[in-house]
Amino acid sequence: MNEREILAILQRYWGYGAFRPLQEKIVRSLLSGRDACVVMPTGGGKSLCYQLPAAMTPGKTAIVISPLIALMQDQAAQLDQMGIPAAVLNSSVSGSEQSKIQHRAESGEYRLLYLSPERIALLQTVAWLKRVPISFFAIDEAHCISEWGHEFRPEYRQLNSLRKNFPDRPIAAFTASATKQVRHDIIQQLKLRDADKYIMSFHRANLRYVVKESDSQNQPGQLVNALRNYKGSSVIVYAPTIAKVEETVDFLGENGITAIGYHGKMDADERRSNQERWMSDEVRVMVGTIAFGLGINKPSVRAVIHLSRPKSIEQYYQEAGRAGRDGEAADCVLLWQKRDVGLLTHFISQLSDPQEKQRAWGRYHTIRNFVESAGCRHRQVCEHFGEIPKWETCKACDVCGYLPAWLMAARKLEKKRKKKARPMRLREQAPEFPHFGSAEPAEENSELREYLREWRRGRAKEDGIPAYVVMHDTSLAEICAVLPKNLIELRRITGFGEKKTELYGAGILAALEKFRTGARASEQKEPEESPTEATLRLLRKGHTFEQIAEIRGRLVTSVYSLVAKMMERGDLEFDSQWLQAGRQQQIEEACKQLGMGRLNPLKEALPPEISYGEIQLVVAFLRSQQTAR
């Protein structure tokens, strides 16, 4: 197939006039039936590399293997919006629907079919797939097959049977983060034959890496000031533990920043709801553990902020790489603390396999060198993955001279705070710094932008899909600049293929006309009850700490921590009924002997039935008494 025909398909379905680097070569490899190993950084457009050749192969189906239900569903939804038949087979699909999908797949009705690695390993799945007209296999997150990778998953090892069961079908492996050793292991495990290798540069020039040491006193203020700078933009904040996620969400709420959380102990429906609210721009700030982000394809994330050291360079590269997927400038900020070492070594100590533990220690030393060294951050990342840059300085990291204005202002403030050796209280407002401008692309009409975003949220909710599936921010910005008057002009907007223009064109033009005649985005809702107000109200109603945790969707430890902080700042008086008889006296005696600087020595000295939360309450009570004297 010639270049003109391939570009016509790209324009027809995706609404793009040109490929990104390497995309066309990868597409041609798959169209010619060759095996391939593709390493393409997050945001490089790797999904298009297997979706486009699949769309160009009528009557045949590309089998895409992915471990992520959310990713499968989102990609299938996007393909549907583009007019490319696709389906998902996983645990979220009912039994009757699965039977229909399998029957249609045997008839070659789908261009792409998404399966999990667990399902592909089942004998009945293999037997059924042999009746499906398969064009090729595409394996996403392929680094999971390698024991040398940072996300090794045993179920991926079973994919080495694909070559045996389907010897004549091409196999293409895709990953965003793989060292040379991992790439070799992927090729060996999957038995790729004379594979075409495509390794894109690991240098994400639009990302600005900022790595700074912080501590428990200055980190909260730095976070608040950062988020105020990115006001109106989507941000991901990574916290190391579930408790830290909840503490951070509450802290931000107290400082006037609406944020939602995401972690593994949340109810599945709540996780899904929070993810959808963030994806649709209803809430801009997502605070999550590493459980959040895999399979998330939101192009307009302007910042990713880590509140502790990640476990590896690969993990950091992958998580930081969720910023700036639209190609616009974005900040990747890592605020590490010396105490992170304890948490990382704890995780490593939990590993039972000696070899895996050894590899984990290797990753630990690498990430430690990364955060503590004085070398260019971009260069360190590239060299880790086996790429030797030709440049010495990137001009886009803290080592090479880049520092966000909010962090420079925070540094000046910190010098003034040095004399006060106390942590920031929960209600204490981080000082207002000048807004130095968000990294969001400049648009002449911010009111129109907000109006179209609101229209997009409503349409996405109506269709049950993420907002970016309706329209990427880059397309929205272009509409604000061009102001298309008809479908022909809208069709020229980047990202609007034939099907998408047909689906949303009339609605977008109608929205533009309504805005022209005076319509505007809805006013912001009244602020919700703050975490402090909600907890105080429930305490006054006589609820226990356990009941408050359940009502507010928090861990019990988070409730204890919040109440302790409220007592220390004088918003709440201690109630001895919160503890069982005799425990307050035991804790007070321990405090007299050991002091109140750290909770661990107190916990070790007291009976095991006395919890950290109870110790926190008594310590806060004693501190409040000292302050009152």
Image (cartoon, helix red, strand yellow):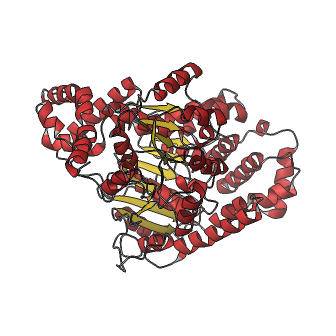
Specify whether residue 327 is in view: no
At 38% from the left and 41% from the top, the residue drawn is 54
- Residue 506 percent location from the top left of the image: 20, 25
- Residue 389 percent location from the top left of the image: 38, 76
- Residue 599 percent location from the top left of the image: 75, 57
Specify whether residue 331 is in view: yes
| Residue 286 located left or right of residue 3 | right
- Residue 601 percent location from the top left of the image: 80, 61
Rendered image quadrant of residue 99: top right
Rendered image quadrant of residue 312: bottom right
Residue situated furthest front in the rendering = 168
At 63% from the left and 44% from the top, the residue drawn is 562
Against 8, is 455 above or below?
above
At 58% from the left and 72% from the top, the residue drawn is 366
| Residue 340 located left or right of residue 272 | right
The quadrant of the picture occupied by the C terminus is: bottom right
Against 443, is 363 above or below?
below
Looking at the image, which is closer to me, 292 or 14? 14
Looking at the image, which is closer to me, 412 or 547? 547
How many callouts does the rendering have?
0
Residue situated furthest top in the rendering = 96
Looking at the image, which is closer to me, 99 or 277? 99
